[in-house]
Image (cartoon, rainbow, N blue to C red):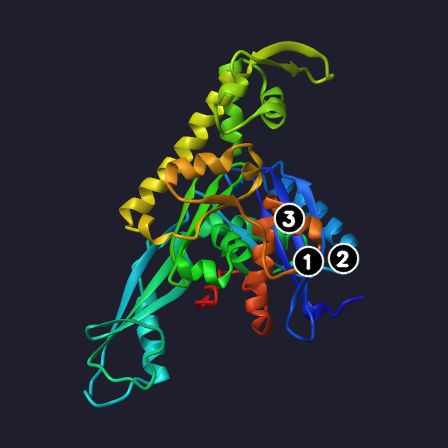
Amino acid sequence: MFDPDSLIVGLEIGTSKICAVVGEVNEAGALNLIGIGQAKSRGVRKGEVADLDSTAEDIRVAIVEAEKSADVEIRSVFLGVTGSHIRGFNNLGVLQVVSVDRAITPEDVQDVVKNAKAINLQKENHLIHAVRQHFHLDDQDGVVNPVGMTCTKLEVDMHVVHGNFNRLQNPIRAVKSLQLEVDAVAFNGLASALALLTPEQKEMGALVIDLGGGTTDYAVYAGGILKHTGVLAVGGDHVTNDLAYALKVPMGRAESVKLEHGGALVDDTCRGRTVPCENDLGLPVKTVNLEHLRRVMHLRLEEIFQYIEQDLARAGLLDRLPAGVFLCGGGARTPGIEKLAERVFQLPAVVGKTNSLNGLKSALDQPEFATAIGLVRFGSFQHKKRGGFLPEALRPIVEIFRK
């Protein structure tokens, strides 16, 4: 049996599946994955809890499977959150230094960071992340550590991620109904980036896109720091819905034909071809035009990528991503998805793989497990700061530093 205090569990409550990943921090501080559990998700819509009882039961199934896989007892989790209510933006904190010749102290740094966090969120919203970026000393930009330096005005850039308080509470309530504690919450898009990107890729500049069932989350790193985050309430389920409407088949059949014959591109190999669309008994009841099927999927997936591309263009980030685009989530398994991303973003694109982790090879190589694995990594950063989670309020997440 493992030491309970060395265990870190990441829990993703997704639209298509619930996934729990168990990690262990060894004596040398290295993180190993030792167990995984998953269950079909029945009570989540567009990344948010719609049926508390069904969600809690599905979480229980995933947790029990993870406990059996790792041979441990799970007591608490680091919980991933998503949804259309989550927003990210950059904020500036300012501190006037009273004496010209006085060196900046750690207390000054704490004060300017506090000022950057003092944002005027609507009362129903709550802070999830406040990620420190760079400092500015008068006219000097890009300062990493200002302590000991002098200036008259100290500023700090902070990336803030926030969401609706009540909608954040719902997945927490589902977890706590199972007598489990929530150590902290983290945005799924950030967790996926932590799982996939190396320090070198973060420094170069990279975009991570998590193509889930009900949402598409994305995060941008540049210069080693988190620059941008976003959520689209559109995912693989919307592709299935499009197919059901276009092919005039039930949702279940549309999902099956998507998985068996779908693709993100329309090319010569699918022109003039038809594929069977089976009924619930496995009997072919009709055929569908493969080119039509692929075109429906292509248009929806292209729309998702174009929206993200336009958002990054407005933020002035498209020229800061030489490391390219890293795809994860179940949608990353769609044939041709990398080529479609390359066309839209005009950048190299790959299906991402988790890095610098040991343990379950089968989980490390699966794009749909990236978020839960990233939540374990997020928890490992704060391993020495673990504690209870106040049921009355969400704790602001500990800042994630550059590397």
* Disc 2 + disc 1, Cβ < 8 Å: yes
What residue sits right under mark 1 in the picture? Answer: 22
Which label belongs to residue 365? 3
Look at the image and tell me in which quarter the N terminus lies. bottom right
Classify residue 382 by image quadrant: bottom right
Mark 3 vs mark 2, CA separation in Å: 18 Å
Amino acid identity at mark 2: Ala
Q: Amino acid at mark 3?
A: Asp
Direction from residue 3 to residue 323 in the image, left or right: left
For the point 47% across and 22% down, the residue is 296
Q: Amino acid at mark 1?
A: Val
Q: Looking at the image, is mark 3 or mark 2 nearer the viewer?
A: 3
**Residue at the front extreme, as displayed:** 268
Q: Residue 331's spot in the image, x, y percent?
A: 54, 37
Can residue 253 be seen here? yes
| Corner quadrant of residue 133 | bottom left
Question: Real-space Cα distance between discs 1 and 3?
Answer: 16 Å
The residue that label 2 is drawn on is: 70
Q: Residues within 10 Å of mark 1 (few under 14, many from 20)?
A: many
| Front in this rendered view, residue 94 or 310 | 310
Q: Does any portion of residue 50 appear in the rendered image?
A: no
Numbered disc 2: secondary structure: helix
SS under mark 3: loop
Q: In the rendered structure, which disc, 1 or 3, sits on the residue that comes first in sequence? A: 1
Residue 227 lies in what quarter of the image? bottom left
Q: Nearer the viewer, mark 1 or mark 3?
A: 3
Q: Earlier in the sequence, mark 2 or mark 1?
A: 1
Residue 60: percent from left, percent from top: 70, 48
Q: Nearer the viewer, residue 311 or 344?
A: 344
Q: Nearer the viewer, residue 368 or 318?
A: 318
